[in-house]
Image (spheres, rainbow, N blue to C red):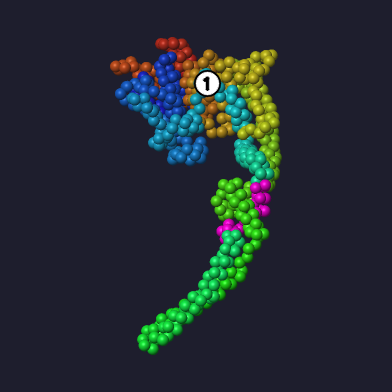
Amino acid sequence: MLINFLIQNYAIIDRLEFQPQDGFTCITGETGAGKSILLGALGLVMGKRADSKILYHPDRKCLVEAVFKIEEYQLIALFESLELDYSEETILRREILPNGKSRAFVNDSPVTLDTLKSISAHLLDLHQQFDTQGILDPSFQLDFVDKMASTHAELEIYVQHFKKWEQLQRKWNKIKVKIEEYAKEQDYNEFLLEELIQLNIQQDEIQSLEMQRNTLYYAEEISQSILLSLQKIHEEDHSLENQIRFINQNLSKSKLRHPSIEQFLVQLSKIEEELMDFSQNISKFESQLESNPQKLSKVDARLHQIYTLLKKHKLNSEEELISLQETLEQKTNRLSQLESLEIETKNLIDHCQSELERVSDVLHKKRISIIPEIESRMKDLLAMLSIPNGSIRIELIPLSEFQLNGKDQIKIWFSANKGSRPDELKNIASGGELSRIALCLKSLVADKMVLPTLLFDEIDQGVSGEVAHQMGKIMRNLADKHQVICITHSAQIAAKGKKHFYIYKDHSGEKTQTKLKLLEQEERANEIATMLSGQNPSASALANALELLEQ
């Protein structure tokens, strides 16, 4: 509920403060007094654009602030989603600076205009004479039927299934794309993998094979070198063996002359032992050498296979080949895994789709069941508003595809005159008829939900007398449970208000200003009489005004 509306330095308003009550509040005034300016300022806190040209004093900022009590609106989740602090008394504020820059705030937190629009849409419902496009929107129309049919619980379940179904559909489509990608490469990947499996390369195999190849290739040369070395150790006159023996004999003659000679003889003995060990080991190694062209050919062939695959895949080591094999195994296995996942996901989709069908059928039946009541009550309300032969027919057309709000397409057919052929509401209804239809729809749904503050701007344009009286009656009934503010030219509607404000231009200062005044009972009677008969109303006009107020 709007509890305070403050305007400073806007258009021809220096300062204006409006404190509407709960229930039905009316605003009247002469044409050009500033009612459109009031609505323009209200539009600022609803997120509409503005510039510095609207400043009353060009060197000062403009401030527009609306204070709402929102505890009934269940908006905590909305505030959390927008990362704003929730308060049961919420302030929406706009500031327009002299340089043209604009700032928006919710409870003193800076916000974007989109955020301001999101919040204000839940707090204010502004209905102007030519602003009736909302009721022509099929989503609005279906939402209206849902409110009347009390389908909130079923619709919530349906939306949960629908979002899950959409999520599964997206997942399924991604899996199918992946399957197509993997399937295109599958044959080639399997071929590459088979090559690597057949190769069966081992860790550090290249180094081992190259050593084998070198040993086999140079076997004779290595053998000759070893035999020659053994010959130098054992067989020649000046062999190492004979020379060590000579050194030993020669030093032994001197060990009695000097004790230190003994240590050199011990060291020489060790050299002789190591030489014998060396001779035995290298002799054994030589005996194992073989010149085997067949085995060399196999080693060369194996190395050639490995080098060929390394070059083919632009790799440098057997470790990289082993890693490639693991990757190819994952890719080839991934296709079968994806195919299994595709089947599993499709089964989930089918199950979810069955649930959607079930809940959408429940939704459809509940919607269908309320339509006769809506059509009947709309006919009565239209008759009250001087469309005695008006009729509304609501058609629900089953769709083949799931939508966010079910599987129904809605069409509203309207006929204003007896015997005339109904046509879709969007094609046939005039502006005045749409305004009255909108009022009837909001009146019907008012008992089903918590509505934001309803602000009607000249919805009574072109109507008077009994029609205006009935229109005021409908709005007053609306105001029993909701805050309703109406800017009106109709005396019959103004008389129905719980509170009555008068908007006017004050020319007493240096600059003209728009001001707003709460009328007392006598002032109110005089204003309604003026609306009925013009300036300086007669006694009969005043009596008529008092009668309207008493009604």
Q: Residue 72, relative to residue 139: is it above or below? A: below
Secondary structure, magenta segment, majority class: helix
Find residue 337 and report its horizontal and vertical position in percent: 66, 48
Is residue 208 inside the magenta stretch? yes
Residue occupied by mark 1? 131
Check the image and name the residue furthest to the bottom: 256
Quadrant of the rendered image containing residue 534 = top left
> Which stretch did the figure color magenta?
190-213
Label 1 element class: loop
Check the image and name the residue furthest to the front: 237
Name the residue: 54% across, 15% down.
Answer: 463
Q: Residue 530, relative to residue 8: is it above or below? A: above
Tag 1: residue type? Asp
Q: Residues within 10 Å of mark 1 (few under 14, many from 20)?
A: some
Find residue 163 and report its horizontal and vertical position in percent: 61, 39
Name the residue: 67% across, 17% down.
Answer: 422
Quadrant of the rendered image containing residue 12 = top left
Give 64 or 399, whichever is nearer the viewer.
Answer: 399
Residue 236 placement, left or right of 173: left
Find residue 329 and report its horizontal and vertical position in percent: 64, 50
Q: Total number of numbered labels? A: 1
Name the residue: 62% across, 52% down.
Answer: 304
Give 435 or 121, whichever is nearer the viewer.
Answer: 121
